[in-house]
Image (tube, rainbow, N blue to C red):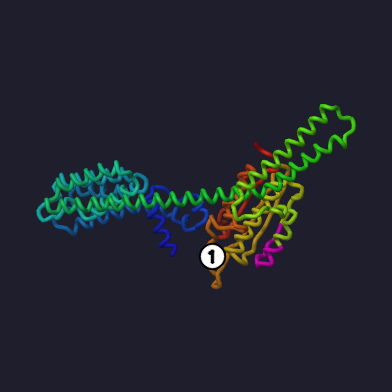
Amino acid sequence: MPVTTALRDLVRAVATGHDPKPGEAAASGRTRRLARLRPHLRVLAPLAAFLLWLLAMAGLAPYQVGRLETILLAALTAAPVALMPRRALLAWRVAAVATLVSGVNGLHEAGAPWPGNPVLILVYLVVLVVVGYRHPLGVLFWVWAFSIAMSLLFLDPGVGYGSMLLVSGVLGVGHLLGRWAQARTGLVVERERGAMLTERARIARELHDVVAHHMSLIAVRSETAVYRLNELSPAARAEFIEIAESSREALTEMRRLLGVLRAPQEQSLTAPQPSLVELDALVAGARAAGTPVTVSVQGVITGVPDSVGLSAYRIVQEALSNVARHAPGAPTDLTLHRNQHELIIRVRNAVKVDPNGRPVPPPAAAVTGASGSHGLLGMRERVAMLHGSLSADQTDDGGFEVRATLPLECQS
């Protein structure tokens, strides 16, 4: 399975011209192994093409291995293989030059079926597929026209017409595969965007209680100030009354906004939002579900801003939920450290093993979390809201670690 996945990732890298995304690399150790192998593959692939070319030349009577043209054409045959992952169009140009040189220098001698060895033809066709995959129709037209011209120039009419169909079909297949990949990527992007917007709306609904609490305090204190404070001037009394009215209007508008964000089937939020005060109950629930959690708290984590406490609770909840779902029974360390400026959360689970004692790879980066949220996507949105930072990556021992830093001071 790892070999199959590595080959699939290599084909994807050759076709698209870039490495997998950092999030994918963090979620899979197979991608890291592929990244270590890719420099060797880029060296070995041209060498393999060179050797295959020489073997093909030695096996066909019309081609002479000892001539200088053979060595030069071998290099031109191997070069497109090295250029193809990053510069597909340049790889095609080199392959076209190799085909031209092969035809002009008389390698299409008596008895030879085509002007070049079989490896050169195969490399040329593979390059055409990659070019068709990665370039628009305007570029493909000129590639097609030049390839057809070479076919008609160096091949007999019967063979040339067949090669025209072959070139057209190869380019068409590459182009269709490229458009299909673009459509699939666009669909994935739209799904991720929809999930992100849904998660942001959910976070906004959760923060309603936090904001409403403070706005209500402002309104109440402003309304009662004229009764609690004795020596207030008429101007000060009028100011407090205006502040109270503005606070009430803000609460009304916020409730209307909450109604827009809420889905039609959702009910109004009535329970207060959790905070780090309920952390012990959250950890106890995870332990009851079979996840051995070790908690380490450095500093006083109570008394943090309400938005920070809510986000910290949800991040811990999501992380423990993912451990229970994808690595049940794995020992997990939960660390919370508060200093003067920030709250640092770290949830790290050891590698899960199967019944045979073999390690099981960690979950994918985009897993579904608890409470209908979207796992790490929800964590990132909460951290971004507070201008913090989040990292989620595989550990050296094969486990998984989520680390979030939440500033305690408001940042604009």
Write the residue at 59% across / 63% down.
Answer: 325
In this view, the residue in front, 206 or 27, is: 206
Where's residue 272, x and y in %?
A: 72, 53
Q: Residues within 10 Å of mark 1 (few under 14, many from 20)?
A: some
Q: Which span of residues is magenta-colored? A: 284-295
Q: Is residue 292 magenta?
A: yes
Q: Is residue 299 magenta?
A: no
Task: Using residue 223 as the reference point, say whether residue 360 is left or right of it.
Answer: left
Where's residue 195, x and y in %?
A: 54, 51
Q: Which residue is mark 1?
A: 360
Where's residue 352, x and y in %?
A: 58, 65
Residue 57 vs 342, above or below: the answer is below
Residue 48 is drawn in which quadrant? bottom left
Write the residue at 74% across / 50% down.
Answer: 301
Residue 94 is drawn in which quadrant? top left
Task: Using residue 133 as the reference point, say whether residue 255 is left or right of it.
Answer: right
Write the residue at 73% across / 60% down.
Answer: 281
Write the residue at 56% across / 48% down.
Answer: 197
In this view, the residue in front, 170 or 227, is: 227
